[in-house]
Image (cartoon, rainbow, N blue to C red):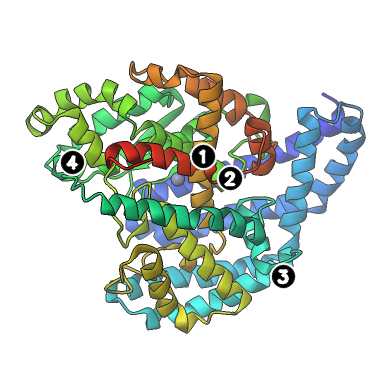
Amino acid sequence: MANAYQALLNHLKVIRNLESSAGLLVWDQQTNMPSAAAEERGEQLATLSHLSHEMFTSSKTLELLDAAQPEIDALPSDSMEARILQVLRYDYQEATKIPSEFVAEMARVTTLAHEVWAKAREANDFGRFAPILQQIVDLTRRQAELLGYKDHPYDALVNMYERGMTTKMLREIFDAHRQPLITLIESIQASQKEVDDSCIHQYFDPAKQKQFAQEMVSAIGFDFNRGRQDIAVHPFQISITRNDIRLTTRFEDHFLNPALFGLMHEAGHGMYEQGVATELMYTGLDSGTSLGVHESQSRMWENIVGRSKEFWQWAYPKLQATFPEQLGKTALDEFYAAINKVEPSFIRVEADEATYNLHILLRFELEVALIEGSLKVEDLPQAWNERFEASFGLLPPTDREGVLQDVHWSGGSIGYFPTYALGNLLSAQYFKRALEEHPQIKQEMTQGNFETLLGWLRHNIHQHGRQYTSEELTQRVTGESIQSRDYLEYLHQKFAGLYNLET
Ligand code: ZN
């Protein structure tokens, strides 16, 4: 490779090494670190992120980009190098829009806000959280101004997580599936079918849960030679490099789902990162392209595969053999109905596939209203409850089960929630395309063979890393933009069977 481009890559490699070292410290913080080390760890992370940010936003980066440009212009415009340079220029522009004083101020307020939020949630006292949430909303508005936008300040925020996505596009996508979801849930409730899910709420030895869950994620294709799994209170996946992917899970004595579906979810994220092309290592493009596409991978393995009848035709006898006392007498159909039970509830993270996106739509509307100033922070609990009742027919008994439940706003992550819903939609959209190309995928699942599906995902999605935006990628893979049609069709098909609905 030519000289100037190589010099750019060398510069990026140092930055990536600082970032991945910070990632390892974050992983350690959440899994192994003694609690007394929290303050120093905060200092260590601040030091590393300051160094990598300084280095990336320095004029040297721009000089190296400019110097490499003529070499890259001599290559075909659709070459990987051309795309790398294009994405790096975009990253550089975005990173240099935010002054470091602002980054420091945001970090200071959100660190404080996390404490305040945790206490307010525990005490069920929104009033305690409101003043600092107001500060975060004000800071976030300033952030939107710094980043810039065309139509709506919220565009700048969502763009940080889902490049190119706008408030208007989100409204269209979300409006198209709000009512169909409500109608589906109503018809499920009207079916009067009572699902007994007591079989998944028995005592399950955590050590055996761990062993079984690891066996499942190995089978679907997570490579434990390039990754590992540990315990964390709030499970997550973190990619140190494509050869070092850390998954975390939590285990509940009397509930199978967190370990089982939680680990398949995180493994879905992890397999995406493991599948990024080797050539992208150290470039800064060596990760998933957006949070929505990332979530499409975790949701596909957790739900579309992990909660399918085909998967359990293969896996259920193994689960029964692991827990003969608990499940030996429970039929596959009963277990399958239990893991797919639909029940409107207050807490997003416990929501089933049919109700999940409604939780997100509610948060999206409130965030947009807060950012444009049409909703005051002090009126948030009431607005939450009104909208919740309109969507779910239920009124949260307390703010703890309502507006105070999520950590995101205290962390300044306004604009993040929509990506969860986009992930669900994309999971169905991509899976449908994979099935069209390889109709045998479902049959293979009944034999514990996931190679065709994973191979398809690797080829069409994983290897590209951040070379394409989610919109570009979705167009390439499915020939259209993100839409809710395929997700609704998937839900209808699945729940029509489970709840004897008319189609
Ligand atoms: Zn996820």
Q: Quadrant of the C terminus?
A: top left
Mark with earlier residue (1, 4): 4
Q: Is residue 116 visible?
A: no
Mark with earlier residue (4, 3): 3
Q: Amino acid at mark 4?
A: Ile
Taking the image as shown, residue 428 lies to the left or right of residue 475, namely left
Taking the image as shown, residue 76 lies to the left or right of residue 336, namely right
Alpha-carbon distance for marks 4 and 3? 49 Å
Residue 164 in picture, x, y percent from top left: 69, 51
Alpha-carbon distance for marks 3 and 2? 29 Å
Please tell me the numbered disc located at residue 145: 3
Q: Is mark 4 within 8 Å of ligand 1?
A: no
Q: Amino acid at mark 2?
A: Gln
Please tell me the numbered disc located at residue 486: 1
* Relative to 20, residue 476 above or below: above
* Quadrant in the picture for residue 129: bottom left
- Residue ID at (39%, 83%): 127
Q: Secondary structure at mark 4?
A: helix
Mark with earlier residue (2, 4): 4
Whether label 3 touches label 2, CB < 8 Å: no
Taking the image as shown, residue 260 lies to the left or right of residue 91, namely left
* Quadrant in the picture for residue 315: top left
Q: Is residue 370 visible?
A: yes
Ligand 1 located in image quadrant: top left
Please tell me the numbered disc located at residue 483: 2
Q: Secondary structure at mark 1?
A: helix
Whether label 3 touches label 1, CB < 8 Å: no
- Nearer the camera: disc 2 or disc 4: 2
